[in-house]
Amino acid sequence: MATAIQLHQDAKEIFFDDLIVSKTDTTGRITYANEMFCRVAGYSEAELLGQPHSIIRHPDMPRAVFKYLWDTLLEGREVFAYVKNLARSGDFYWVFAHVTPSHDAARKTVGYHSSRRIPDPRTVRDVIAPIYAELRREEQRHRNGKDSLAAGYRALTELIAARNISYDELIFSL
């Protein structure tokens, strides 16, 4: 089992130079991790295999984004998202993720494939980080209630609706 990660105030951003790839089963447990994923996240392949993909979930990430991601995947559709991940060291790295359902010969979903690329740093800094901070604030405002996730998700859908575009159109317009 991987060790718990200690967050630190002087966390540094990690940059990478190749595609990060992983695969999971239908419950989100890692079944494959390429070398770049292992290197950037700071885990060996053996430490990652069988772990929930949330092992790299950064606490700055709004839960609403993951709800949207999972809802989309469970509908059998691919999804794109900007994600801030947490390395074992406590440092972080941003990715532009493309996640797709994997199917068997009978078209039954048997897992998920995720390819993550380097995002445009200006898009992350100027657009995504402020949006995610607002979604996290909304989730935290409702922290003591059961509707924390619902509040963040409502804020996400309102943001998209206010722009009169779909989530995908928002992501690809950035």
Image: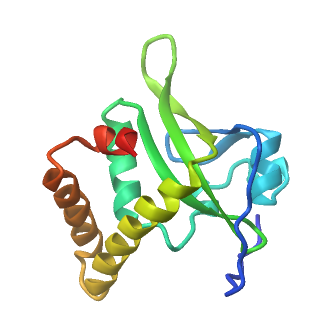
Where is residue 113? Give x, y as percent.
57, 33
- Camera-side residue of 16 and 125: 125
Left or right side of 2 for 100: left
For image coordinates 22% across by 66% down, the residue present is: 155
- Camera-side residue of 3 and 20: 20
Where is residue 9? Give x, y as percent.
67, 87
Left or right side of 62 for 48: right
Residue 169 lies in quadrant: top left
For image coordinates 28% across by 76% down, the residue present is: 148
Where is residue 130? Give x, y as percent.
40, 69
- Camera-side residue of 17 and 69: 17
For image coordinates 26% across by 60% down, the residue present is: 156
Left or right side of 165 for 96: right
Where is residue 38? Give x, y as percent.
80, 50
* Residue 168 drawn above or below residue 12: above
Q: Quadrant of the N terminus?
A: bottom right
- Camera-side residue of 161 and 109: 161
* Residue 125 drawn above or below residue 174: below
